[in-house]
Amino acid sequence: MNYNHKHSTYIWERSDWHDFQWDSNKLMEPLARLSQLHGLLIGRMTMLGFNDKSRSMLSSMTNELISSSEIEGILLNPQSVRSSIARRLGIEDDGMLVEDHYVEGLVDVMIDAVQNCHEQLTDERLFGWHAALFPTGRSGMHKITVANWRKGDEPMQVVSGALGHEKIHYIAPPSSNVPYEMAQLIEFCNKSNLSPFILAGIAHLWFVTIHPFDDGNGRLSRTLSDMFLARLEPNSSRYYSMSAEINRNKNSYYNILELSQKGNMDITQWLLWFFDCLEKAIKRSLALIDNTLAKSVYWDKFRDVEINERQRKIINRLWDGFEGKLTSSKWAKICSCSQDTAIRDIKDLLSKGMLLDSGEGGRSTNYILPHE
């Protein structure tokens, strides 16, 4: 069977395949920025109390799992993911407990990758991850090989488009090559002394290029990245979500992958894209933590001020990301109270300095927190 694609040579067809190259000068600045931002993130985390720290970790891990599946078009129940992670990590969560065996498997994989991030990678460990992703032995309606490398003579293709108008984006190495290819990757992962930032980027690309399984390759390549990135965290915790950022930039993700899997072994552009994505993920997390710290300072300042449950509910909504602008009519709707009650609640908070008039006036009158 001819695996050559008519458009260009894939990197796995080259004689120097595995010999990844990159321009260290071009990576120096982004790597320095990443290290600085990451150090800042760790510093900020130490300022959070135990509960806020736990909630922050719970949110980012929930985000990570939901987003990694969403990239593949699989929508998970967020509450089910959150309650499963909370239970596994021993974090108290006020949400409903939603049992879902499929989600349990995904959580197992993530926790093994993150909490045991310094352990060796092996065939068996990867097979365990794969089995957890496909507990029924099926992908949708199709029976697939689970907990083992893909089999068969059919080419493994990444295809998009309607039936009869398919576009082939990528053809992976033949199944017969996979055991050898994975042995090379696993040895590299276990012996490399590269920065975890670089290692996470290379392992991701290398794994998804081999495409060793019938399905789940994208999710497991991102799990591998997570494993290496967790090595940078004290106590192997995770406070940002790389997959959530990839999901926001899905088109450019697939484009840069397709580009990097063809041509030569220089992966500088892929690593620059990967670092940029990581930088955005850490910045997003920093903004959330800064908000958590500001919220904590706010409640500390007003801890002796008496307010009712409606007021507390709305203020917490404002801190946690309120949709649009807060008006008296929105207040009445959210709290299921009359317009008069809403106005009374608002005036009370204004007099106590817990809320400010935005100054827009008239029909546009709306209210903001004093820190904004």
Image: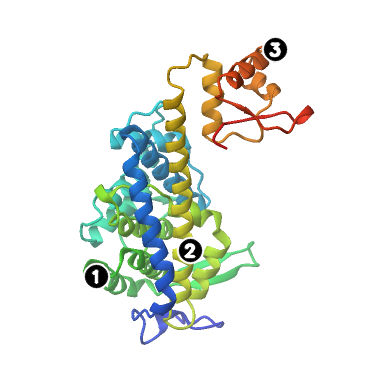
The CA distance from mark 1 to mark 3 is 66 Å
Left or right of residue 355: residue 284? left
Report helix, strand or loop for mark 2. helix
Observer-nearest of 116 and 330: 330
- Give the mark, 1 or 3, whose residue is nearer the N terminus: 1
Where in the figure is residue 233, as x and y percent of width and height?
29, 52
Within 10 Å of disc 3 (Cα), the crowding (few <14, some 14-19, many 20+) is few
Q: Is residue 299 left or right of residue 101?
A: right
Pick whichever of labels 1 and 2 is earlier in the sequence: 1
**Compared with residue 148, is residue 16 higher up or lower down, i.e. above or below?**
below
Residue under the point 59% across and 33% down:
322
Q: Measured from the top left, where is residue 342 in percent x and y?
A: 65, 16
Q: Is residue 343 above or below residue 228?
A: above
Which mark lies nearer to you, 1 or 3? 3
Looking at the image, the residue that sits furthest to the bottom is: 15
Residue 154 visible? The answer is: no
**Quadrant into which the C terminus falls:** top right
In terms of secondary structure, where does tag 3 sit?
A: helix
Q: Is residue 168 visible?
A: yes
Q: Residues within 10 Å of mark 1 (few under 14, many from 20)?
A: few
Q: Which mark is residue 193?
A: 1
Label 1 to label 2: alpha-carbon separation? 22 Å
Instruction: Name the kind of residue labelled 3 in the image.
Output: Asp
Q: Which residue is disc 3 drawn over?
A: 340
Q: Quadrant of residue 47?
A: top left
The spot of residue 169 in percent (x, y) is 54, 71
User: Picture quarter containing residue 196?
Assistant: bottom left
**Tag of residue 276:** 2
Against 97, residue 30 (above or below) is: below
**Quadrant assignment for the N terminus:** bottom left
Task: Tally the marks.
Answer: 3
